[in-house]
Amino acid sequence: MSPADGFVTHCLELLAPLGVARSRRMFGGHGLYVDELFVALIAFERLYLKADEQTRPQFEAAGCSPFVYDGKGRSVTLGYYTAPEEAMESPALMRPWARLALEAALRARAAKTPAAQARSPKARAPRR
């Protein structure tokens, strides 16, 4: 197991108390899901949790940093913030932060327009 795989496993263990946690490789990092909701990403060997207008102030107050990358010569900031250092120590310490990320993901899903939901592969799959 590579050090990166070990870090992914550790992050999944931190998120597991909230539901079924899984990862998917993407863009040189990993996307992390809880109960099929995209709640976090791992990039540059750091865990970033989903944030929105309601939760961003809590992440900022805790000194967390936003996820920023260079996109075609300009900095792009996404709605993800690093987890507080102490939260990386145990699932119990991560739980409130992971819950904020899960709540932000639920709000984002609820805000999707019906047209966007209809375009998703799951929406087009025949029911059995």
Image (spheres, helix red, strand yellow):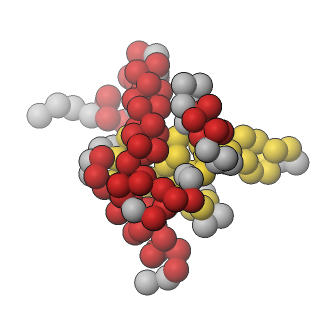
Above-or-below relation of 28 to 69: below
The residue under the point 65% across, 39% down is 60
Is 112 left, or right, of 65 in this rendering?
left
Res. 39 visible in picture: no
| Quarter occupied by the N terminus | bottom left
The residue closer to the viewer here, 41 or 102, is 102
The residue under the point 54% across, 25% down is 54
Is 12 left, or right, of 2 in this rendering?
left
Q: Residue furthest top?
A: 114
Above-or-below relation of 8 to 59: below
The residue under the point 53% across, 74% down is 4
Res. 80 visible in picture: yes
Is 105 left, or right, of 72 in this rendering?
left
The residue under the point 60% across, 51% down is 82
Q: Indicate the quadrant where residue 53 lies.
A: top right
Tell me residue 7's x, y (percent): 48, 71
